[in-house]
Amino acid sequence: MTISELARRAEVTVKAVRYYESLGLITPERLPNGYRTYTEDDVRLIREIRTLHGLGIPVERTRPFLECLAAGREYADDCPASLASYRAAIDELTERIEALTARRATLITNLNAAAHRGSTAVPPERTGTGGENHLTLPAGLPVPEDDGTADRLPGTRVPPLTLLTTAGKEVRLEALGPGRTVLYIYPLTGRPGSDLPEGWNSIPGARGCTAETCGFRDHFQELLEAGAGRVHGLSSQDTGYQREVVERLGLPFDMLSDPELRLADTLGLPTFEAGGARLFTRLTLVVRDGMIEHAFHPVFPPDAHAEQVLTWLRENPM
């Protein structure tokens, strides 16, 4: 097909096709008369470039995905180099999110100061960690103690509880599906610009839910490759609150909501009080065919926990 036909089929401009050629991302064949000719493979490559560019991956960095297709893989992200490109893009987005979060916190502070300037009313205090970066853990966090919870849970059957997911579906914990499920349980996630319970940083194991969740997001594909059939986060926060977290952090998995902490009461899991609410203590279960196969507790540091789970899965293949 001609370059104009290719551009029309791939829904790009002729100029874009020429740019992709200049980068060596597509290589047309030459007819005896010197004219370029293109194939269905070129259409697929350009469509892949467009999709990746829509996700924020620069055109110049789509090469690993195109090479994966050229190697005969069904999907462009079936190769290790493609996964590395995903991670690099995620890291860049994380840095941008952190910068925007810090900028937002400054704007909120300026707004509060400006709104109350010259007024007898006192500006609202920012207690807890609301003005801090939820993705970065402060130094000197207290380390939670091992109370033996992880020792007694393996071999225990998962109770028959039905919980609501952020996808709007009901999930029965005793029927999560065949194989392994990684179920990381956490107290609560904070939102940029909002306050966490007073003294949150001083409670052993409390701080770090967002960082932990981002870890499971970033290592999600590796966890699946290591034998996890699925990953879920679980907390007592309501589904609406959790859904905002899923969307803001771009999570590839669903959260489960247990507002009454029924799982803790049924299994005797540890909990704690903060801000007038009873919350789950951070803990992770590896569930296999309806049975708890392994438990991680205490979990520390939370931002490295996904890697700890990944290491365990690799060292304990099914």
Image: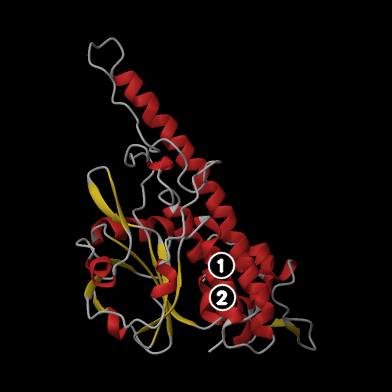
Residue 276: give x, y in percent of width and height: 22, 44
- Label at residue 308: 1
Judge whether 258 appears above or below 273 on screen: below
- Label at residue 312: 2
Where is residue 6, by image quadrant?
Answer: bottom right
* Quarter of the rendering occupied by the N terminus: bottom right
Residue 316: give x, y in percent of width and height: 57, 83
Mark 2 and 1 residues: CB-CB less than 8 Å, in contact?
yes
Q: Colour scheme used in the picture?
A: secondary structure
* Residue 54 appearing in the image: no
* Residue 100 appearing in the image: yes
Q: What SS does tag 2 mark?
A: helix
Q: What SS does tag 1 mark?
A: helix
Residue 170: give x, y in percent of width and height: 22, 76
Could you tell me which residue is drawn at 59 percent across and 60 percent down? 89
Nearest the viewer among 281 and 218 is 281
**Disc 2 residue type (three-letter):** Trp
Q: Residues within 10 Å of mark 2 (few under 14, many from 20)?
A: some
| Left or right of 47, for residue 277 | left
Judge whether 44 appears above or below 220 on screen: below
**Disc 1 residue type (three-letter):** Gln
Judge whether 87 appears above or below 142 on screen: below
| Left or right of 304, for residue 17 | right
